[in-house]
Amino acid sequence: MSANRPAILVVEDESLVRMSTVSILEDGGYDVVEAANAQQALAKLESRPDVGTLFTDINMPGSMDGCALAYAVIALRPDVRLLITSGRGVPDEGACPAESTFVPKPYTAERLLMTLEQVRQ
């Protein structure tokens, strides 16, 4: 936890994609918290009140996909900004919260960091 680095929670079940994303975000000046599924993400969000942004993949194993996770996060922490990603196309309208921003896979480091800065403003 770093007081001068904004915290972001990255939720991605594919470990190589998660490692790459974490590297991009850390190099971009973020304090990154990792989770492999929605249940882990909710537990980490509860223990890390400094997390200001959720970046989640839509398609994940378990009882909750990324869109359902985003809705749960809004209910718990309406202050958290939402970035959602998928390699399977844009989610149907209403599937994910209207407050979320979609970042299609594959994304470049530049695109991810630029979108994140826009969302955080």
Image: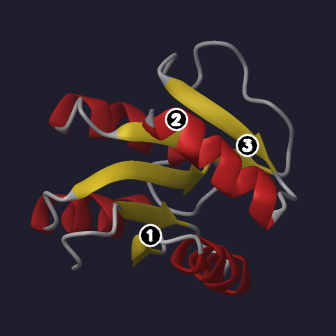
Q: Which residue is mark 1?
A: 30
Looking at numbered disc 3 in the image, what kind of residue is underneath it? Val
3 or 37, which lies in front?
3
Looking at numbered disc 1 in the image, what kind of residue is underneath it? Tyr
Q: Residue at x 85, y 45 (%)?
A: 88
Q: CA distance from mark 2 to mark 1?
A: 14 Å
> Residue 100 vs residue 16: left or right?
left
Q: Residue at x 62, y 83 (%)?
A: 23
Q: CA distance from mark 1 to mark 3?
A: 18 Å
Q: Earlier in the sequence, mark 2 or mark 3?
A: 3
Residue count near mark 3 (Cα–Cα under 10 Å), binned few <14, some 14–19, many ≥20: many
Q: Percent position (x, y) of residue 94?
A: 58, 14
Q: Percent position (x, y) of residue 70?
A: 42, 38
**Residue 92 location, quadrant:** top right
Q: Residue at x 18, y 59 (%)?
A: 50
* Marks 2, 3: nearer the viewer: 2
**Residue 18 location, quadrant:** bottom right
> Residue 95 vs residue 114: left or right?
left
Contact between marks 1 and 3 (CB within 8 A): the answer is: no
Q: Earlier in the sequence, mark 2 or mark 1?
A: 1
Please tell me whether residue 110 is drawn above or below residue 92 in the rendered image. Answer: below
Q: Percent position (x, y) of residue 56?
A: 54, 53
Q: Which residue is mark 3?
A: 103
Q: Which residue is mark 2?
A: 119
Q: Secondary structure at mark 3?
A: strand
Contact between marks 2 and 1 (CB within 8 A): the answer is: no
Q: Earlier in the sequence, mark 1 or mark 3?
A: 1
- Position of the N terminus, as image quadrant, is bottom left
Q: Percent position (x, y) of residue 20?
A: 70, 81
